[in-house]
Image (cartoon, grey):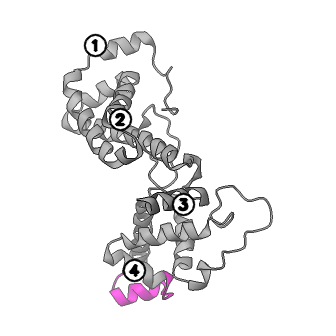
Amino acid sequence: MDDINHDEVSAEEAADCSADINYDSITPVVESVASDMSRRYGQYGADRADISQECWLWIFLHPEKVVEFLDNGDYGVKQLAKTLRNEAQDYGESVKAQHLGYSLDDLYHYRKDEVRMLLDAVFDEEAWTEPPVSEEGPTGRRDPATGGGWIATLTDVSQAFDRLQEKDRDLLIAFHREGWTNKMLADSAGVTEQTMSYRHDSAVRRLVDKLGGPRPRPQHDEDCSHVWRNRHALSNTTARAIQQQNYEE
């Protein structure tokens, strides 16, 4: 819960907002989220009670947001559930990282342009044995091409690719393995080049989503629901920890 600003509302404002909240109406939402997330992260030690507590903590620290959600009827309740799910997932990922022996800082967030480059490598057998040479100069500790994390990165992208729908897989194979251009595919499909470019871009975006989403962007509102820490490309430390866990199971 480190991302929460405990001072974002005054005590008086919090008390006023809290008085307007029907906590009985929120309880089923909290319990549903806690139940779902405990099934996902229970094996790592995140039990239902702890997850429920994390959700309630967010609610008590953000009464003004809760009131705003509840004022929007069913849509607002769904948005509240989404926000609590993100908070619970954030907590679950931290518990999972501690259980497996790695840090959340070991997770690598993909950008769309990186995924395009990595797809070329996924379909190139030589790329799996010979990582690309980084440009001269210092490299970041999260650079997937350094520190031996290259294979873990390609594996992550390859596994995410396999979870795409067939039409997206076929399109990306045409681009990144067969070397077709937007114009060639557009002519073959009987659509404009612009339409084909959009389809390619959309397929790559869906692949990024399968990898856990793009790097979180800072937002100027007080809503913490933008925090999204699904599993991204793994550093060597993370990959070894999870590989060992899978072997032991």
Say whether residue 167 is visible: yes
Q: Which residue is mark 4?
A: 171
Q: Which residue is mark 1?
A: 19
Q: Nearer the viewer, mark 4 or mark 2?
A: 2
Residue, x 30% and y 47% (percent of image)? 39
* CA gap, disc 3 and disc 4: 29 Å
Mark 2 and mark 3 lie on one chain; the one further toward the N terminus is: 2
Whether residue 188 is in magenta: the answer is yes
Q: Residue 188, position in %: x, y?
A: 37, 90
Identify residue type, mark 1: Ala
Q: Are marks 1 and 3 in contact (CB under 8 Å)?
A: no
Q: Are marks 3 and 4 in contact (CB under 8 Å)?
A: no
Residue, x 80% and y 62% (percent of image)? 137
* CA gap, disc 1 and disc 3: 47 Å
Numbered disc 2: secondary structure:
helix
Q: Are marks 4 and 2 in contact (CB under 8 Å)?
A: no
What range of the chain is rendered magenta? 176-192
Q: Residue furthest front?
A: 248
> Is residue 32 or residue 70 the one in the foreground?
32
* CA gap, disc 2 and disc 3: 25 Å
Q: Which residue is mark 3?
A: 239
* CA gap, disc 4 and disc 2: 40 Å
102 vs 96, left or right, is right
Identify residue type, mark 4: Leu
Residue, x 55% and y 66% (percent of image)? 153
